Image: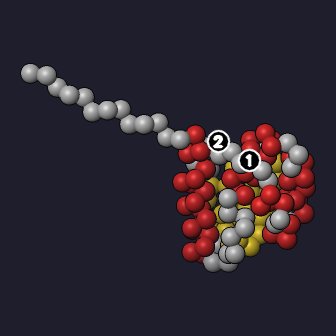
Amino acid sequence: MTTTEAPAPEAAPDSAAPGTHRAENCDAFTQSTRRCTRRAWDVFLNVRNNMDAFNTQQVRARIEADSDSAASEMFDLLKTQTGLSQGTLLGDRIECTTTLAAIQLIIKRPDFKLLDAIAI
């Protein structure tokens, strides 16, 4: 009697691994000045001309949303689209360690209120 092995599951795409989401540009972030504290904007200014740094430099971020449900949706999006593994959802706030490229996925949402971040 022979057994048939099930095919191995395909590897998850790179964007699902923590810290591997890569943006091709930083246009959405550039257009979001009013959604950033001065400290977060300074972090962005230090990497905006270096896409490799924009995609890989880890930041400790506090993201504020208009509501608890909006924060929950953003948190889930960060986890599924960028592989976010270090984060906490606190009502209408997300505190996490990620990249600016990952944050750029949600920064233009109308329910995104404020970003504060420091480079790690």
User: Can residue 113 be seen by looking at this rendering?
Assistant: yes
Query: Residue 73 is drawn in which quadrant?
Result: bottom right
Relative vertical location of residue 85 with respect to residue 4 in this rendering, above or below: below
**In the rendering, at what x and y percent does residue 105 appear?**
67, 59
- Viewer-proximal residue, 21 or 88? 21
Q: Secondary structure at mark 2?
A: loop
Q: Amino acid at mark 1?
A: Glu
Whole-percent x and y of residue 39?
A: 88, 59
Which disc, if any, is residue 24?
1
Q: Which mark is residue 67?
A: none
Asked which quadrant contains residue 79, the reply is: bottom right
> Residue at point 72% right, 64% down?
107
Q: Residue at x 72, y 67 (%)?
A: 108
Outermost residue on the bottom side: it is: 67
Which image quadrant for residue 76? Answer: bottom right
Q: Nearer the viewer, mark 2 or mark 1?
A: 1
6 versus 85 height, above or below: above
Q: Residue at x 61, y 50 (%)?
A: 82
Residues at marks 2 and 1, CA–CA distance in whole angstroms: 13 Å
Q: Residues within 10 Å of mark 1 (few under 14, many from 20)?
A: few
Coloring scheme used: secondary structure
- Which residue shows up at 63% across the image and 78% down it? 67
Identify the residue position indicated by label 2 in the image: 20
Tag 1, which secondary structure? loop
Quadrant the C terminus occupies? top right
| Image side of residue 87 versus residue 1, left or right | right
Nearest the viewer among 26 and 120 is: 26
Q: Amino acid at mark 2?
A: Thr
Circle 2 residues within 10 Å: few <14, some 14–19, many ≥20 = many
Q: Where does the image place residue 72, in percent across and percent down from the top left? A: 57, 68
